[in-house]
């Protein structure tokens, strides 16, 4: 059973990102403040849930949340500032959307930069420990998946509808065959044997 939050007496948000290891598409971050009476039997780390369960949780979380924010950081920015900085920037921009602003931030993973003067704690595998981080992980994942499904229509040969931009064998074969799109992250090693690709 996941705990709601780390600091029961404070207005606390959980934050997480999705798509950090992908070759194409944005990295998407979310932040959420859940009410103190929030309970949900199936909510856990988004990676542990089926796509249909994640999709059913998304509107429920949006309805129940005191506040939530979601941010895409796109490929050009990822290539400019690197994926770690892009992930943290996405979390900061998502927290910025919260009203009220949180008194405490808990972050999935082990890397974060201070956001204003609000104290924070990084929690490794936090999306499997705290409901507010798990909720952020669901929003980040579902919003990012929707974006990848949308751009799949533009470039169906990469099958982003299925692989969501992750480095599957199928995705890499399509890069070999069709080359690189505007949605690919140019700073990433797109092919294992990559020496030079024409961008």
Image (cartoon, helix red, strand yellow):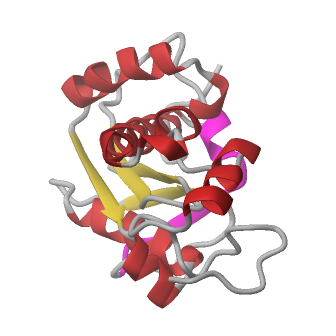
* Callout count: 0
Placement of 139 over or under 104, stated as above or below = above
Residue at 62% from the left image edge and 51% from the top image edge: 174
Q: Is residue 30 visible?
A: yes
Residue 74 locus on image (x, y percent): 36, 69
Q: Is residue 129 visible?
A: no
Residue 18 locus on image (x, y percent): 52, 50
Residue 88 locus on image (x, y percent): 48, 72
The front one of 121 and 28 is: 28
Residue at 35% from the left image edge and 29% from the top image edge: 36
The front one of 80 and 127 is: 80
Residue 197 locus on image (x, y percent): 63, 81
Placement of 64 over or under 111, stated as above or below = above
Does residue 43 belong to the magenta stretch? no
Placement of 85 over or under 163, stated as above or below = below
From the viewer's perspective, tell me whether residue 43 is left or right of residue 61: right
Placement of 160 over or under 162, stated as above or below = below
* The N terminus - image quarter: top right
Q: Which residues lie in the magenta part?
A: 117-128
Quick one: which residue is furthest to the right in this view?
Answer: 193
From the viewer's perspective, tell me whether residue 169 is left or right of residue 104: right
Residue at 64% from the left image edge and 48% from the top image edge: 171
The front one of 67 and 140 is: 140
């Amino acid at each position: 059973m996941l705990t709601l939050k780390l600091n029961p007496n404070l207005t606390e948000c959980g934050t997480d990102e999705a798509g950090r290891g992908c070759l194409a598409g944005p990295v998407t971050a979310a932040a959420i403040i859940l009410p103190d009476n929030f309970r949900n039997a199936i909510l856990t780390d988004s990676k542990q849930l089926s796509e249909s369960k994640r999709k059913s949780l998304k509107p429920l979380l949006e309805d129940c949340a005191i506040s939530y924010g979601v941010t895409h950081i796109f490929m050009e920015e990822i290539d400019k500032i690197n994926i770690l900085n892009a992930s943290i920037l996405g979390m900061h921009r998502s927290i910025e959307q919260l009203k009220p602003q949180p008194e405490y931030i808990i972050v999935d993973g082990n890397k974060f930069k201070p956001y204003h003067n609000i104290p924070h704690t990084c929690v490794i595998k936090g999306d499997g420990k705290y409901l507010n981080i798990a909720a952020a992980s669901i929003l980040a994942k579902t919003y990012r998946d929707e974006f990848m499904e949308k751009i799949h229509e533009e470039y169906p040969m990469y099958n982003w509808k299925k692989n969501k931009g992750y480095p599957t064998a199928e995705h890499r074969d399509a890069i070999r065959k069709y080359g690189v799109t505007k949605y690919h992250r140019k700073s990433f090693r797109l092919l294992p044997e990559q020496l030079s690709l024409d961008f």
